[in-house]
Amino acid sequence: MFDILLQALVRRGIWRLGVLVLLAGLSACGSAPPRGRVGGVEMGASTRVPGISCAPFARELSGIALYGDADVWWREADGRYSRASRPELGGVLVFQRSGRLPSGHVSVVSRILGPRQVLVTQANWVRGQLDRDQLVVDVSGRNDWTEVRVWYPPVGQLGTHEYATYGFILPRRPATPEELARATLPAARYALDTSGRPPPRARGSGR
């Protein structure tokens, strides 16, 4: 039903306003059911959000005030935020630029399953889609999270391609899974507002 409403709004040329309105109602209406399970851990729901990008969403959800394409975040964080080779809740995993990821990619750690497995919440891994609690696995030879495989929601399984990453940018204020879950929909709404350089707002919205 959500996708049908969005398609109608796109045809009428008011899709961005419509997405904001529809996202505002998602907390009450729900979204797509979770897809896939690994080792007893169920992947989160996926929601179509046309126009959403990974970097504005990650900025809003993590509270890390970095701007520009995703692949420059690692460099821009130098001297401003702590960087690490181990995950932390609310931290941002930064993917390097590649043929598959021409602008890089960023995703927010929403749960830590183990030293080499985390769940992330991210935007635009699947084009125009918001994905909650998706599995990412460290496959690097040195166990340092410089190479990963990522859950692919359309097929409901871990992707086979290996992606190079820089590591994790850590938030100044620790997060909890509950806080990140509450902030996900506000972050998606704010991420669609690309005018200027507003500071991250989602984690402080309280709803």
Image (cartoon, rainbow, N blue to C red):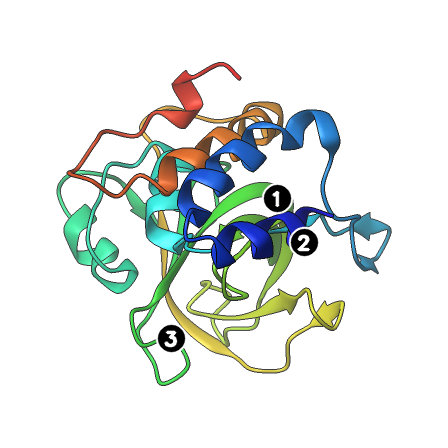
Which comes before the other along the chain, label 3 or label 2? 2
SS under mark 2: helix
Q: Mark 1 points at which residue?
A: 112
Q: What residue type is labelled 1?
A: Ile
- Pick the residue in front: 86 or 103: 103
Q: Residues within 10 Å of mark 2 (few under 14, many from 20)?
A: few
Q: Name the residue under label 2.
A: 4
Q: Distance between the Cα atoms at labels 1 and 2?
A: 35 Å
User: In the figure, 124 relative to 16: above or below?
Assistant: below
Q: Mark 3 points at which residue?
A: 101
Percent x, y for residue 169? 33, 46
Image depth: mark 3 or mark 2 in front? 2
Q: Which amino acid does label 3 sit on?
A: Leu
Relative to 129, 67 lies left or right: left
Query: Who's the residue at 42% across and 52% down the image?
Result: 52
SS under mark 1: strand
Displayed quadrant of residue 204: top left
Which residue occupies the extreme right position in the image? Answer: 40
